[in-house]
């Protein structure tokens, strides 16, 4: 039965009804469902710890270890309680990672066992967690799921699963046992992608796999702190809650509210049909409007600007003495720790280590691991492992510890920077107009970029600046764009971004939801590559100079001034 829509009581995070009927939600192009609390509900099994303890005791016996099943069961129960606390705390984070199976088993569930046994069993963590998933709870299909999936199949609405899970493998098996796996085009589980809700990346991965953008999808979950927050952060078209045992007991107050709260998934069928029927009925009039009627004027908010650094603000001339200059610093370090090497060896290590880094980036960019494809390299890995390969082990250890300092030194030494003509003029013009300008840059040293901008005299004119070595993600990964966007008091659709690479900047900016992406000629990509980005809708404009953006901003300010809500809020356009 469909319930009235609900919102949150600001004082308690409790869900309260706000009216009768079904709200008018946008028609979805895809439906994303949580596993537990939506597709299935669970009933706890009191004997799970004892049963799993017997399995652990049997595994330990193969090591010659004699364990007491009662003590192991206590460790399992204590570990699961601590794990629950960790999960509650993680759901407060903006982009929580998932624990690796070995961490769950070794650091939580079996933390009280002798080290050799604990470490050995952690190697079989995947097996233990798959077994545990079926022992902890019974899984029962929720009312209305068969009808909902059949409705989506009939309407050709693709379906996906988005679920926090210690064992996605077990979840897949449960769906198969219920005969439901055939309905789902994608299944995204936190243990398989390395991030967990409310990280919006899980929803984005599922949407990408179904060929839709998040605003075109509905997300259906059962928790406020994980599902509602994840849906809002991902920007889905609608967030729906189907009530289950954890819905009304969030671990802390949640500000975000769902669009619709239902007692069971059965109640979702009516609003889904209504949304799809409304869209179908409106289609002819929309077609007529596009053929003859003038479009409604756009309602824009105040613009903001994000700029790439290299190729946009700065043009660099390579320094042929780079390897020797940084190598001299490595020589000095080697002498301080008592394991000296010569300059030729150190300079060669810098050159070869940097090439290993470049090869690693190319391999990672084509990786099949979507959660970590765009991870920025850890300075300790760059210097201790890639540059340090073949150097004395104590020196490698010292390089790991000083990795960030050596990245700064390399950034200073690798090229001679100079402002790109028109870049500083653009930044200063924006400052005069009250337009916030931020930075989104792939770099091994954000500190080094800040030094350059300070020398140019514009550091104080810049707002949120996201550097890949500090964010941990490289463009075209969405997270680095989102880090900068989060510091702007502007809708992403009102942001203008300027870069010089069709993939990192064009695809990356559009993938992050930025409204206007401009690419500059004269950077890393050829004119042909830029033209292809423009034709493929990964860029809106190709410009010859950074200050060519000023003309676009002038027009945008005029549009903003024509919007009643914005009029008077800021200086008028020139």
Image (cartoon, grey):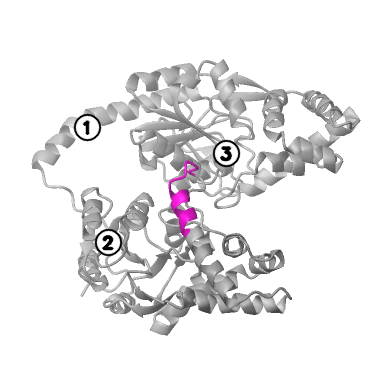
Q: For the C terminus, give its image quadrant.
A: bottom left
Q: Dot 1 corresponds to which residue?
A: 282
At numbered mark 1, what does the secondary structure look like: helix, strand or loop? helix
Tell me, yes or no, if residue 211 can be seen here: yes
Residue 336's place in the image compared with 13, above or below, is below
Which residue corresponds to mark 3? 190
Q: Residue at x 45, y 68 (%)?
A: 465
Q: Nearer the viewer, residue 270 or 67?
A: 67
**Lateral position of residue 177 relative to residue 315, left or right:** right
Task: Kindly indicate the quadrant of the structure image that contains residue 15.
Answer: top right
Disc on the earlier residue, 2 or 1: 1
Instruction: Read off the magenta span.
Output: 358-370
The one nearer the camera, 104 or 64, is: 64
Distance from Cα at disc 3 to Cα at disc 1: 38 Å
- Residue 565: x and y in percent read 29, 60
Question: Which mark is nearer the camera, 3 or 1?
Answer: 3
């Amino acid at each position: 039965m469909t319930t009235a829509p609900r919102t949150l009581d600001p004082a308690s995070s409790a869900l309260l009804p706000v009216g009768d009927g079904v709200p008018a939600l946008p028609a979805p192009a895809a439906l994303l469902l949580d596993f537990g609390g939506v597709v299935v509900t669970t009933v706890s099994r009191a004997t799970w710890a004892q049963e799993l303890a017997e399995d652990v005791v049997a595994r330990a016996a193969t090591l010659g270890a004699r364990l007491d099943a009662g003590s192991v069961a206590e460790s399992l129960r204590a570990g699961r309680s601590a794990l629950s606390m960790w999960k509650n705390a993680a759901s407060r984070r903006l982009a929580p990672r998932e624990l690796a199976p070995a961490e769950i088993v070794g650091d939580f569930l079996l933390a009280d066992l002798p080290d050799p046994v604990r470490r050995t069993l952690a190697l079989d963590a995947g097996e233990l967690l798959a077994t545990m998933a079926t022992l902890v709870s019974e899984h029962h299909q929720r009312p209305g799921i068969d009808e909902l999936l059949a409705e989506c199949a009939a309407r050709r609405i693709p379906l996906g699963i988005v679920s926090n899970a210690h064992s996605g493998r077990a979840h897949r098996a449960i769906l198969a046992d219920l005969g439901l796996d055939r309905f789902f085009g994608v299944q995204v589980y936190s243990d398989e992608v390395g991030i967990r809700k409310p990280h919006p990346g899980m929803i984005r991965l599922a949407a990408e796999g179904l060929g839709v953008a998040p605003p075109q999808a509905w997300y259906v979950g059962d928790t406020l702190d994980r599902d509602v927050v994840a849906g809002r952060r991902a920007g889905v078209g609608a967030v729906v809650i189907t009530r289950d045992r954890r819905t009304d007991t969030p671990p802390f107050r949640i500000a975000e509210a769902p669009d619709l709260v239902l007692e069971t998934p059965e109640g979702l069928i009516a609003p889904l049909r209504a949304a799809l029927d409304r869209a179908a009925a409106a289609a002819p009039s929309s077609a007529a409007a596009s053929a003859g009627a003038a479009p409604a004027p756009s309602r824009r908010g105040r613009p903001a600007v994000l700029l790439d650094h290299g190729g946009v603000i700065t043009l660099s001339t390579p320094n042929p003495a780079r390897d020797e200059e940084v190598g001299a610093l490595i020589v000095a370090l080697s002498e301080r720790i008592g394991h000296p090497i010569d300059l030729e060896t150190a300079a060669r290590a810098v050159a070869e280590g940097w090439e290993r880094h470049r090869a690693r980036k190319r391999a990672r960019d084509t990786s099949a691991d979507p959660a970590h494809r765009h991870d920025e390299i850890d300075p300790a890995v760059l210097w201790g492992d890639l540059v340090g390969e073949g150097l004395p082990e104590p020196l490698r250890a010292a390089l790991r510890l000083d990795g960030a300092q050596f990245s700064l030194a390399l950034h200073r030494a690798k090229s001679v920077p100079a402002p790109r003509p028109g870049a500083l003029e653009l930044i200063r013009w924006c400052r005069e107009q009250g337009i916030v300008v931020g930075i989104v840059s792939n770099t091994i040293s954000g500190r080094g970029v800040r030094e350059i901008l300070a020398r140019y005299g514009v550091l104080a004119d810049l707002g949120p600046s996201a550097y890949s070595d500090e964010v941990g993600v490289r463009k075209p990964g969405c997270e680095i764009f989102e880090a900068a966007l989060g510091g702007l008091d502007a809708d992403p659709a009102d942001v203008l971004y300027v870069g010089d690479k069709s993939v990192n900047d064009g695809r990356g900016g559009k993938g992050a939801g930025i409204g206007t992406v401009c690419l500059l000629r004269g950077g890393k990509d050829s004119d042909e590559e830029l033209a292809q980005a423009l034709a493929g809708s990964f860029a809106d404009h190709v410009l010859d100079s950074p200050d060519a953006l000023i003309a676009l901003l002038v027009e945008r300010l005029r549009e903003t001034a024509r919007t009643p809500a914005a009029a008077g809020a800021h200086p008028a356009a020139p």
